[in-house]
Image (cartoon, rainbow, N blue to C red):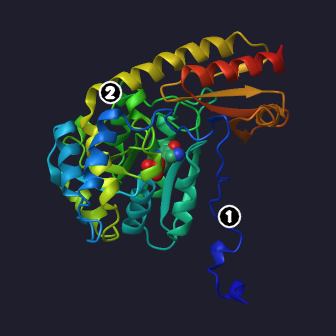
Amino acid sequence: MIKHYIRKELQNFKPYHAAFRSPKVKLDANESPFSLSENVKNKLIQWIEKEENINLYPDTDSTELREAIASFWNVSVENVICGVGSDQLIDCMMKVLLEPGDRVIMPTPSFSMYRSTAILNHGVPIEIKLNEDYSYPIDEIIETCNKNKPKLLILCSPNNPTGNRLPNEQIEEIAQNVKCPILIDEAYGEFSNETMIPLIRQYPHIVVFRTFSKAYGLAGIRVGYGIGDKEMIDAIYLTKPPYNLSVLSQKIATWVLQDEQVNQKRIEYLKTEREHLIRELRNLPNLRVFDSDANFILIETQDLELSEKLEARDIFVRSFAAFEGTVFLRITVGNKEQNIILIDALKDLLI
Ligand code: PMP
């Protein structure tokens, strides 16, 4: 019965489900292997002991957290907006911009939520295939934007699941030749050496989204943020739900961001592990291993059951259907122990 009332474009839509599991080695969702530092844990315990403000609604504008983010990036508070993960901000942005039938241009392969969020918001996704080596086809992007007059262009850098970044100078080339709003998704930006954030003043049609779910180890409390020109941020505010971030999420994200030495150490650790893992993977037979600027590595294999074989050993990675005869696996960089278990299992399965 309800089926007849569901919007046409959602008749064949697949809702987002992901099995909730806790395997021994979980390398399937680009999460951090690190949880709260001692320092943040102590602040949290003290805060809970004082029982502060759980009975009251949180600050709907996440002011303290936005101040911390603004000071971290040397921008003003009015250049920052916070969301329940960057997922929520992607949704808000599309809600603000899209009228039925409006186009959103996005790379493929890339983060699947761009496409589904566009459809959910009555938009029409237009996917631009990345080059063979997964670099961005700059001229084609510019041309497609100018031809299709989209409401939004999304660029993901470093890109999920390919791992490569889009160099700033190429983003600037696009920004100089494309008029529509451009969302630069830097969910993995902490693992790369470049960011567009300092350039928001120069390009007011750009907004950069980041998240606390990856480098900061806070996937469980869902906090993301956007940085852009005040006019851009004010526009996204039009559709931000009230009280979107809980008191706890705001507090923990603020403390974590201020824990700079710990963050830096953890990011460096993961970058070192990533390079080590890439070297180890390249020593294995019959794998194509891509470079990465993120906290995950993409590999291509002809063993179509490789991910199931790893799962049987309680090691979870993310697999993507590829061309006939090969499959892609996206492997999150874990801690040293997890990475050793993964490599040992792959040696066993592939050699
Ligand atoms: N952007 C990209 C490219 C991602 O991979 C993810 C998470 N997988 C997100 C955004 C969303 O992150 P979150 O909602 O946890 O901030």
- Counting from the top left corner in percent of width and height, residue 213 is at 44, 44
- Counting from the top left corner in percent of width and height, residue 203 is at 25, 44
Task: Indicate the quadrant where residue 50 lies.
Answer: bottom left
Q: How many marks?
A: 2
Q: In the depicted view, which residue is nearer to us: 143 or 264? A: 264
- Counting from the top left corner in percent of width and height, residue 326 is at 80, 32
Query: Can residue 247 be spotted in the picture?
Result: yes
Mark 1 residue element: loop
Identity, as a three-letter code, of the amino acid under mark 2: Val
Question: Which labelled disc corresponds to residue 59?
Answer: none
On-image quarter of the N terminus: bottom right
Query: Can residue 205 be spotted in the picture?
Result: no
- Residue at 68% x, 64% y is 14
Disc 2 under 8 Å from ligand 1? The reply is no
Instruction: Determine crowd level at label 2: few under 14, some 14-19, many 20+ residues with C-alpha closer than 10 A.
Output: some
Task: Indicate the quadrant where residue 172 lies.
Answer: top left
Residue labelled with disc 1: 14
Instruction: Determine crowd level at label 1: few under 14, some 14-19, many 20+ residues with C-alpha closer than 10 A.
Output: few
Identity, as a three-letter code, of the amino acid under mark 1: Lys
Residue labelled with disc 2: 262
Vertical placement of residue 344 versus 198, above or below: above
Q: In the depicted view, which residue is nearer to us: 187 or 38? A: 38
Whether residue 291 sits left or right of residue 34 in the image: it is: right
Q: Quick one: label 2 or label 1, which is nearer the N terminus?
A: 1
Vertical placement of residue 336 versus 263, above or below: above
Task: Indicate the quadrant where residue 317 lies.
Answer: top right
Q: In the depicted view, which residue is nearer to us: 191 or 166? A: 191
Mark 2 residue element: helix
On-image quarter of the C terminus: top right
